[in-house]
Image: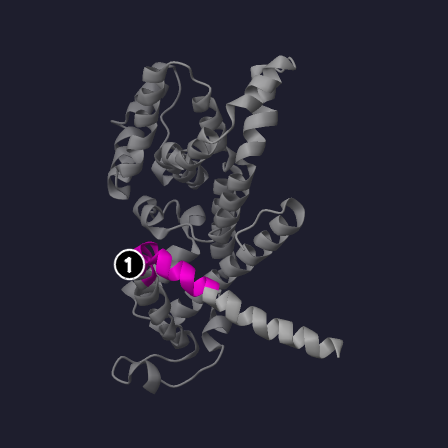
Amino acid sequence: MSDNNHAIRIDIAKPKKFHHTKKRFIKHWQLYVFLIPALSYFIIFHYIPMYGVQIAFKEFYANLGIWGSPWVGLEHFERFFNSYYFWRLLKNTLILSAYNLALFPLPIIFALSLNELKNGAFKKWTQTLTYAPHFISVVVVVGMLVAFLDPITGLVNHVISALGGETINFLTSPNWFRHIYVWSGQWQSLGWGTIIYLAALAGVNPELHEAAKVDGASRFQRIIHVNLPAIFPTIVVLFILNIGSFMSVGFEKVLLLQNDLNSETSDIIQTFVYETGILEGQYSFAAAVGLFDSIINITLLITANYIARKVTDNSLW
């Protein structure tokens, strides 16, 4: 009898919940309309093209099309895993990604520092100065690097020579490639990356700082015990997103900085996909390599989200 009553309560609850959801949708329909462009973008350009992933398991011929091309199973994956360049590509991609991830705290530190500035004019000037590089194209950034680091005419080598040192050919040195790539990226994205943290800091209750002052907390202690906990959920979410794109180094700047002399450290999976897929026309093989890269990213994203949910109670889902 109790089971029947329980079933009846569930049946009654479902229509009520549906009615409530429908009522909210009708009341706020304008907000849902704003979602249509974003949803359309992801469906058209991200989800529908996913049917083409199957060419990673086929020998793709343009005249036969995706559906008509013969299946080869895991042949392209085996070819990539058994190739002599597999470990070098994987190693370089992992090191470059880990180097970038190690500098994840920089925007947090910069946002906390900006938030403590009392001079409003200087704060705005600093924000503008650090945001501006984000709007410079990758090609221009690489052009600037080439100009500054040139062994003969570059400003950096002129300074080194003036201090009594020997000129360094930065752009052809495998040892310098990773530092140039990562730190130039930090220069370009640091200011932009602080925007979300500054927005989160703007929501900190001033009364918490007043209470901390009354208790005798110093400015540094208030940053650690008031500001940092306030933006911690934001930090966790952005860290998970960074983990989810761990393997997505991006081939544009790497390709522009790459040459035969620094290829020992500049060969990564993304540039390999570009070269084999676009330049050599090995579409199925390139799709398999790209899919392998994406699977690692998805695995890391799910793992990081699971750990964050268990440890901090903050996660993407």
- Image point (55%, 43%), residue name: 236
Q: Nearer the viewer, residue 3 or 172?
A: 3
Which structural element holds mark 1?
A: helix
Q: In this view, does 67 lie to the left or right of 104?
A: left
Q: Can residue 65 be seen in this view?
A: yes
Residue behind mark 1 = 37
Kindly identify the amino acid type of the residue bearing the numbered disc 1: Pro
Q: Crowdedness of circle 1 by 10 Å Cα count: few (<14), some, many (20+)? A: few
- Dominant secondary structure of the residues highlighted in magenta in the image: helix
- Is residue 244 depicted above or below 42 in this figure? above
Q: Nearer the viewer, residue 91 or 58?
A: 58
Q: What stretch is highlighted in magenta?
A: 20-39
Q: Does the magenta stretch include residue 249?
A: no
- Is residue 131 depicted above or below 77 in this figure? above
Which quadrant of the view contains residue 47? bottom left
Q: Is residue 53 left or right of residue 216?
A: left
- Image point (47%, 56%), residue name: 89
Counting from the top left corner in percent of width and height, residue 12 is at 57, 72
- Image point (33%, 19%), residue name: 159
Q: Which of 191 and 88 is in front in this view?
A: 191
